[in-house]
Amino acid sequence: MKNVTDPFLSLGYWPSAGSFGFNTDILATNPINLSVVLGVLIFFGKGVCASCLLSDLLDNRKQRILKTIRNSEELRGGALEKLENARARLRKVEKEADQFRINGYSEIEREKLNLINSTSKTLEQLENYKNETIYFEQQKAINEVRQRVFQQALQGALGTLNSCLNNELHLRAISTNIGMFGTMKEITD
């Protein structure tokens, strides 16, 4: 493992004289790099005034910043206008909501009273129907009892008549009835 890492560790220890290599001394390399960069700038930028170029760059930057500020102010104004419109709509909606709430409570109370009234009327009608049904059932029961009493009395009378009547009495009752019908016919004629 020592053999693999040796070349990387020794990069910082190469001698600077006589061969091409890396110079790891930061203080020695910065002035060289700066002089090379300045030389290239001077060579290629001979016709350009450095202060003019810097002034133009600053002016362009200033114009962009001012434009951004103006756009921001316009956007801020538009946002404030939208905010005011939204607040006005909110106040309007809150008033309408309060009105709906008040009307809703009134409507609820009215509906409650209507429901109570209709329920009491329905209960009254049901009570009347119940009373009519009870009366009808009582009359029906009374009629049934009357019929049974009448049938029992009739059966008792028929039983008594059948046991008491003989042929002679039966013929006499028939002739008396025929005589009464004959008299009634003479009176009506």
Image (cartoon, grey):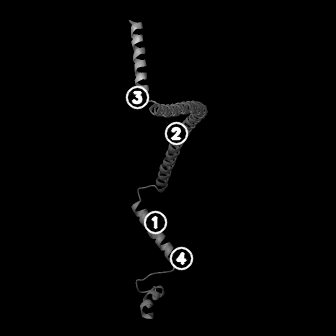
- Viewer-proximal residue, 104 or 110? 110
Task: Report, in whole angstroms, how far the alpha carbon at label 3 lies from the one at label 4.
Answer: 167 Å
The mark nearer the N terminus, 1 or 2, is 1
- Viewer-proximal residue, 167 or 35? 167
Tags 2 and 3 in contact by the CB under 8 Å rule?
no
Q: Which residue is denoted by mark 4 in the rendering?
A: 27
Q: Nearer the viewer, mark 4 or mark 1?
A: 4
- Viewer-proximal residue, 64 or 161? 161
Q: Nearer the viewer, mark 3 or mark 1?
A: 3
Task: Report, in whole angstroms, how far the alpha carbon at label 4 lies from the one at label 1.
Answer: 18 Å
The mark nearer the N terminus, 3 or 1, is 1
Q: Which residue is denoted by mark 3 in the rendering?
A: 167
Q: Amino acid at mark 1?
A: Leu
Q: Nearer the viewer, mark 3 or mark 4?
A: 3
Q: Amino acid at mark 3?
A: Asn
Which percent across, then down, holds residue 70? 52, 42
Q: Which residue is denoted by mark 1 in the rendering?
A: 38
Q: Nearer the viewer, mark 1 or mark 2?
A: 2
